[in-house]
Amino acid sequence: MADPKVGEMLLHDYIMPPLYDGRYRLDVSTRVTVDGQPKPLENKLAYFDVDGPRFTLAAPEVAGVFPPRNGHGPFDEAIPHIALGRRTLPWERPFSAARASVDGTPLNAGGMPIPWMALLIFEESECTIDTKQKISSRLPADVVARLGVPGDQLVDTVTASRDLIVDLMPSYEELALLTHVRQVNVEDRELAAGDSDGYFAVVMSNRILQRNSKYRCCLVSVEERTDLVPEHPPAPDDGVHIVDTVGFANEMFIETLADYSSQPGTRPEFASMSMAGMAIGSAPVQAAVAVDKGRAAKFETSLDISKSPYAALFQKSLILLTTWVFECTGSASFRALMQGLDVGMIGKPSKDGPQMTDTGHLRVESVNRLGAPETVFYRGPLVPTPLSRDPNGPYHSADQARRVAPDVGAEDVSYACAFEVGRLLAAADARLAQELMRWRRGAYLRSAKVDSSMMMSKFLGIAEMVDNHLPLATYFATKTIGRMAKGCGPLADPSELVKLAGAPGFNMDLVRQAFALETMDHAQALLGLGNSLLGSSVEAPPLALGEIETLDHVLRDVVGLQRLQDVRAKMLDNVKTQLGQFGRIVR
Amino acid sequence: MRAPLVTGSATLKARLNQPGQVDATAAEAGMPPYMESFLAHLRLLVGVPFEYLIPDPRLLPDESIRFFYLDRSWTDRLVDGSVTVGKIGSREQAHHHAHGDAVSRNLDVSERMVRSLQRGRDDFAKVREQVYAKHFVPTTLVTGFLMRSGAVSGWPHMDVRAYSERLGEPFDVASPSAVAKQLPLLRLERLSPGVLFALFIGVPALVTLEEPHHGVQFGIDVSPNGSDANVPLRSATGQLLSKGAHAINLPVPRRARRRDVIDINRLRDQLQAKAAVEVDDSGHRPIQQTGSAAFAIAVLYPPWRQRFEGTEDKAGDSPHIKFEVMEISQRVRQASLKLAVETTYRIKEA
């Protein structure tokens, strides 16, 4: 089946492991036939264990619990559950070996295999947790024998009264119904955690939580606990219920009576009683009300079961895999609270509410500057109707923001209050004052610069835009010198090049005549003028922008270098050709 | 020594006459990060004492939610007030006056950074870059709600969303169509353990408050007094079945000896019996009870999503006219115009 999409989940009734946990023998025999003669190879025997959590559950196996560990909240509508990161975990052991068939398919309840774990919820006072107990000291001997572990195996246990455990314990089919596998998309952040494969085994409990109680959730192993797990749930409630006290009475109740009764050896008949009493009475003896009123009264007053030496006999222990506590507090669920909310716009009129104007203003008593009491209007920033924004620029004092309501003539101090609150909040923040100063200083420096440059521009008659980000001193210095230099006429000829150019030896025509050269070009080449000597000028090849940006690029530009070298060689060739006949003279 | 070209007093005079000293786009005109962040937070009323928001506690009674528009003039004044700090003379005043508009426009965008900054996801520079890169149209209308409820303290991480349209249930909050309609959240904060404050951009037509998700939950409906427990019937996909806008409830059977233990077997049997006969308004049938997976779907308890929609403004039933005068009087400063308005609406008679 396709994986579920994000936000979706697929639920499976169960996922069976290929093999139960346990010890296995691998018996390999190979039949070989050679030329019609059977020559079997030697049998090989191997042993292996399939191991898994059995007496405790490491923390990483638990993918999540609800209600949260140590959580406080109104969880009274929740069904507590635990999510396990391994999808096959609840079915990795047969609930009871006697109920597992040969091929490993469990003989099951209603078509489903029975998981070996159950989530029991105790009120905090109802159970005791013991760690590192010898299994034989806590579990009945026959259970330990069926589990097949040594009696000194150390386990954590939860112990509660036998009646309570029987009352809470799901039956075979219920165990199966309360355990399922959830498959979510591995990308789903909300549902899948960390490195999960997207599958979780989920074990739910069957207890309805009561408000204002502390609860302890215990994930217990019910492997081989056929003494506690009933095959069928208790009969439905028909109003009156016969209390079965014979079970424990046979064991020790007579002895108890012997201690407290004046007539040893007789057993009182127990009668029916109402359900309500059962729900409250946690001690079985108190619940079992004898017909003989007098004697019953004696029990109830004199017998405190938890302190009697037989208390342990009423208790049953279960192997504890993992446990957490939470507290069911608060009076209502999220939904009930939400549905009960009083909804309205701000300033919703109410009988007990303050008197307000229709604009949402409150009347506030105040004392004005002259010391006279007056009533002013105040309205906070939260208003019941959309308001247009005050377009008037920044205000510089609170008084600027004071208004008078025209219809009643009373003052509206809302915005003045806002101004003062802002001022006080800012003044309370030392760093903000510094930053404000920095902000202003930056602007002042800048405006000083702008002022100066504007003045200089005007003074120097500079029409062009001045980029104020450039160093202004050099800019204006250049401009000033330029202005000073303007109108001075041509400069003198310091290197006397002009005179030199008039010399006959530099006159091309004279040179051509004197040396009887064929063309003017020859004369030009001889004088080294123009570009005739070196040939055409060198054109740089067009550069693709962005390719050559750094010096390293230039150094690695082999093509460009080659082109330059070619041009140089060509130039030298030109020179050689053109100066051929004069080469000796020039040298 | 040469006399300076310009004297200090002449510069000041010139500057006061010409307030636009530094172009608002110049790099030097920008606010320092700390200041911008502080003012943006102020814009969303971060740090403003609660008494100023709700001047009378009776305006926000226990177990109530109050929607509102944010008065932007009020928050502008807050900002004006805080910039006043260190304003000692006409130079500072001229500077503020020149930059007031630019600061205000800047903050219209910067206020979107506040939620990211409050969550501490990124530093200021990065958040600012992200927000400014989106070229938002400056926000004009900001709305929100205040809620005082036990739900705030019990579910501190509830999901708050606002939509510009009413979306019909069921809708997927992550779907593109829903996301497109979702209004940006400017601020979501618990002002005290029991008071939640939220601000949105724009006017929502639908606000949803959703129970925080703790993965998948299972549960039953318990009546407020705790006496009755029901399982509402669900379809095979987990959707709640409804008849006439009411869930179809099945009372939870309990074990005979203990009222607080669900009789799982009988509950399953009764759910199966219902699956054969019940059909809801939209033709869906309850899920067939075939095993533990089907049972789990039947007792699914998805987080509750509370919808607030179509809340009418019932703040005042008096004529609209008065309100307008009030507002105009705040905006109009010229006496003549004010007088004209008053005459128009015949205030003196009232």
Image (spheres, coloured by chain):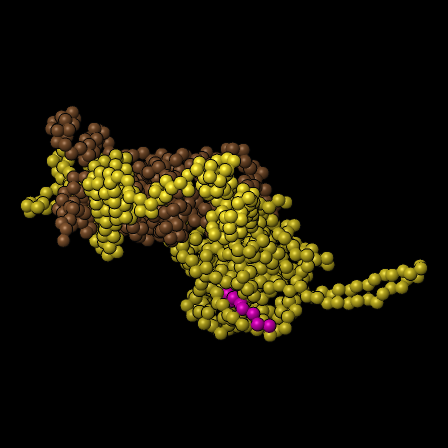
Chain colours: A yellow, B brown
- Asked if residue A190 lies in the magenta stretch, the reply is no
Instruction: Identify the image quadrant of residue B11.
Output: top left
**Residue B350 sits above or below residue A583 on the image:** above
Relative side of A437 to B194, left or right: left
Relative side of B42 to B226, left or right: left
Kindly give the residue lying farthest to the top in the view shown. Answer: B344
**Residue A436 sits above or below residue A95 on the image:** above
Choose between B260 and A532: the one closer to the eye.
A532
**Residue B334 sits above or below residue A258 on the image:** above
Is residue A209 visible from the viewing direction of this image? yes
The total number of labels drawn is: 0
Magenta-drawn segment: A153-160
Choose between A576 and A374: the one closer to the eye.
A576
Is residue A318 visible from the viewing direction of this image? no
Q: What is the chief secondary structure element of the magenta stretch? A: strand
Q: Percent from the top left, x then y, of residue A173?
A: 60, 53
The residue under the point 24% across, 55% down is: A434
Q: Quadrant of the N terminus of chain A?
A: top right
Choose between A522 and A131: the one closer to the eye.
A522
Q: Percent from the top left, x then y, of residue A367?
A: 10, 46
The residue under the point 6% across, 47% down is: A371
The residue under the point 23% across, 29% down is: B320
